[in-house]
Image (cartoon, grey):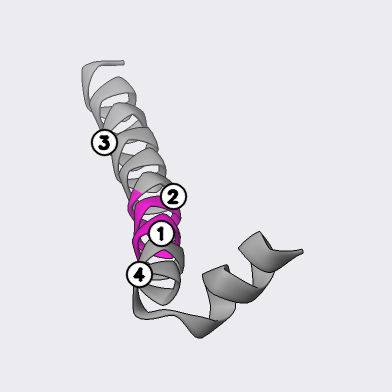
Amino acid sequence: MKAIVDLFSTDYGLFSIGVLLFLLVMAVWFYRFFMRKIAESEKGSG
């Protein structure tokens, strides 16, 4: 329980949440970017 309280109430806990959220957003962005580029590549060569 103390770990959850530390996660949401300390500066390093909030920074950790921010980094995790940033990584998730970046992963989604890269996935969509690469899927779009693959689709464009297949459409252009087909």
Q: Earlier in the sequence, mark 3 or mark 1?
A: 1
Q: Secondary structure at mark 2?
A: helix
Q: Hey, what amino acid is under mark 4? A: Tyr
Q: Which residue is mark 2?
A: 28
User: What's the magenta region?
Assistant: 19-26
Image quarter (top left, top right, bottom left or bottom right) of the N terminus: bottom right
Tell which tag, 3 or 2, sits nearer the viewer: 2
Q: Hey, what amino acid is under mark 2? A: Val
Q: Which residue is mark 3?
A: 37
Q: Residues within 10 Å of mark 4 (few under 14, many from 20)?
A: few
Circle on res. 25: 1
The residue drawn where x is 35% and y is 69% is: 12
Q: Which SS does the magenta portion mostly show? A: helix
Give the answer, above or below, for where 22 lies relative to 6.
above
Q: Earlier in the sequence, mark 3 or mark 4?
A: 4
Q: Secondary structure at mark 4?
A: helix
Q: Which residue is mark 4?
A: 12
Picture coordinates of residue 4, whole percent (x, y): 67, 66
Image quarter (top left, top right, bottom left or bottom right) of the C terminus: top left
The CA distance from mark 4 to mark 2 is 24 Å
The residue drawn where x is 43% and y is 56% is: 20
